[in-house]
Amino acid sequence: MIDLPESWRVESNGKRLNLKSFTPSTLHTAQRARLRKILRKSTLTHQLTGTEIPSLITDEYHCQAILFLDIELTDLRQADFVARTIQPQIKEHAVLHLRDGSGRFALSFAHKRLSLTEDNAVVVTDSYCTEPQAAAAALAPLRHTALINRLNKRDHYLEAMAKAFLLDHPKIFIGAPRLIDTKLWFHGPTILALFRALTELQTLKTKKDRTRSLADKAILNTAIKAAIEKIRMNYEL
């Protein structure tokens, strides 16, 4: 999600956040020191609330807001570590704009549901942190005006997360970019199913690249072909 409307802006310069609130108590000492070294500052710049896009409140989800945080790092190569550490500490669905002094940035998404065992706690079920970007122009499908799902805030967020993955992996299979222009984005469960199918496919491809066994490569090739065919059939590509 980029090029957000001014009506979503929190304050003229954003609201500075306490970095200590992002440090989970379960973090090991070495990881705590690593996080302190990487994080420079965090600012809440925008938030989507109100009825412009309806909230989703069920037994499983409590999505009344989407937060947008600008987080400055000393090293953007640590973006994925920072995202995996910080996102579970934020109850709301949040988009983290992670950047360093070079002008490059990454976007972090985390799909969350209510915990079944702890009151007022959330569980991250799906997440994605983009590759570092040099310019926002390459992310045009993530502009506020380009996102089409307005059914509820959670589905709106899922659309952005799934499209971010597709933009990072245009060659995950032949024809994958065509998914951006299909009608699947109007239905939240379909978006989530697609995101999970794509991430599972990427996991298979990564395993294939890393294995040295010809037998294992053959097995993974078969699984990859089946996964691609399933996506093509489900989304009529």
Image: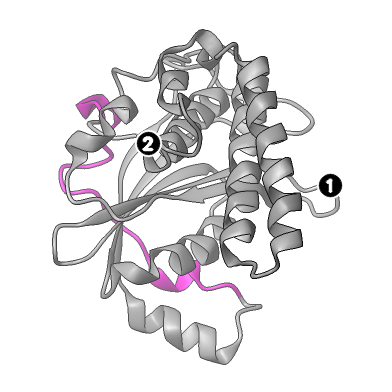
Q: Amino acid at mark 2?
A: Leu
Residue ID for mark 1: 116
Q: Nearer the viewer, residue 120 or 68?
A: 68
User: Which residue is outermost to the bottom?
Assistant: 29
Q: Residues within 10 Å of mark 2 (few under 14, many from 20)?
A: some
Where disc 2 sits, the SS reads: helix
Residues in magenta, as a range: 4-24
Magenta highlight on residue 74: no
> Which image quarter is the N terminus in?
top left
Closest to the camera, between mark 1 and mark 2, is 2
Q: Disc 1 residue type?
A: Leu
| Residue on which the image places disc 2 | 167
Residue 227: image location, x then y, percent? 69, 34
37 vs 51: above or below: below
Identify the residue at horizontal 62%, vertical 77% (top origin).
Answer: 25
In screen coordinates, is 184 left or right of 218?
Answer: left
Q: Considering the numbered disc 1 on the image, is that residue within a helix, a strand or a loop?
A: loop
Q: CA distance from mark 1 to mark 2?
A: 33 Å
Quarter-wise, where is residue 138 in the image? top left
Number of the label disc, if any, that sits on residue 173: none
Vertical comparison of 223 with 49: above or below: below
Q: Are marks 1 and 2 in contact (CB under 8 Å)?
A: no
